[in-house]
Image: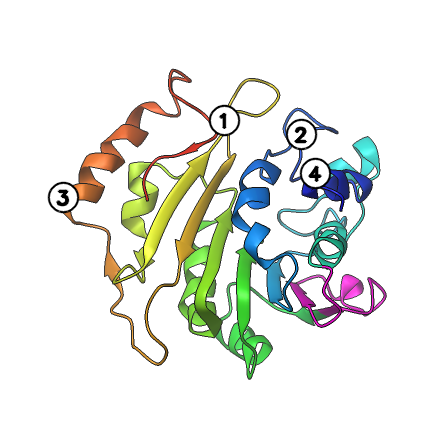
Amino acid sequence: MQSLHSIFYKNKSDKIPDFCEHNHTYHKKYEKLFKKFRNLPISIFEMGIGTIDNNFKSSMYNYNQLYGYESGSSLKSWAEYFHHPDSVIHGGDIDKSIIHNNYGDKIFTHYIDQCNEQSLKEAFKNLEFDIIIDDGLHTIEAAQTMLNVAWNHLKEDGYYIIEDIVADKNTLDSFNFPVKNNKIEIWFDKKSNGLIENNYLIILHKKTKSGKKFRRMNIKNNKTKKINNNFLSIPKSNAFNVGKSVFK
């Protein structure tokens, strides 16, 4: 079977560094993280189909002009990587022009305003996912709004991942994570230009028993405070091990 990197390359994804020095290296982490799901009938949702309309925030217009990036790149990649015939891939975006079912038989798309809780609730209604990826607006406010709704639609032992937000101390403290009995991991890596920039993943692993309610809380415990102090130097210096998780 093809590697995830090869699949991302074929679809010109920005999750690999091959096409632009500002692209990410997420394939390194995702290949390891999702390996156990690859041959199973799983469901995955990704916010952000990748509009190339420059009138929208977080548009991929520049990448389209630079190397031919196309909307739906990630969705098509996930459909190929999770190759089980019963796997389903869902995507959401605010650009209605890219909401269609022409990306593939296993791919379904939804109009979603990530900053609108009701819009998110309507899209996620009656749906559950093994993996949820937030590759949308890349703001704390939008990410928190989506997390508040989508977390309850993540299955046990599932992964909720927030891409492209610099995970420094202030950022982590500003989030209300469902941390009780769950695992939170921060992953980062240098890009091909030698800088980290926004090449971060905030990974939440849902470990609680079915039906158990979660107590939302700020990350304030001593362990996390100590770890968060490490982030203070990250934007200023690259003198640390990259491609590794800060905590688990």
Specify the label residue 196 is tagged with: 1
Mark with earlier residue (2, 4): 4
| Mark 3: secondary structure | helix
**In the displayed structure, would residue 128 be above or below residue 233?**
below
User: Is 184 positioned to the left or the right of 82 in the image?
Assistant: left
Mark with earlier residue (4, 3): 4
The picture places residue 247, in percent across and down from the top left corner, at: 32, 40
Q: Which of 48 and 57 is in front in this view?
A: 48
Q: Nearer the viewer, residue 162 or 120?
A: 162
Residue at 46% x, 56% y is 143
Residue at 74% x, 36% y is 62
The residues tagged by marks 1 and 2 sit, at their Cα atoms, a distance apart of 12 Å
- Looking at the image, is mark 1 or mark 2 nearer the viewer? 2
Mark with earlier residue (1, 4): 4
Q: Do the residues labelled 1 and 2 touch (CB within 8 Å)?
A: no
Rendering quarter of residue 245: top left
- Looking at the image, is mark 3 or mark 1 nearer the viewer? 3
Residue indicated by mark 2: 17
Magenta residue check for 179: no
Residue at 30% x, 40% y is 170
Mark with earlier residue (1, 2): 2
Q: Give the range drawn in magenta.
A: 83-108
- Looking at the image, is mark 1 or mark 4 nearer the viewer? 4
**In the displayed structure, would residue 56 be above or below residue 164?**
below
Residue indicated by mark 3: 222
- Looking at the image, is mark 2 or mark 4 nearer the viewer? 4
Residue indicated by mark 4: 5
Magenta residue check for 86: yes
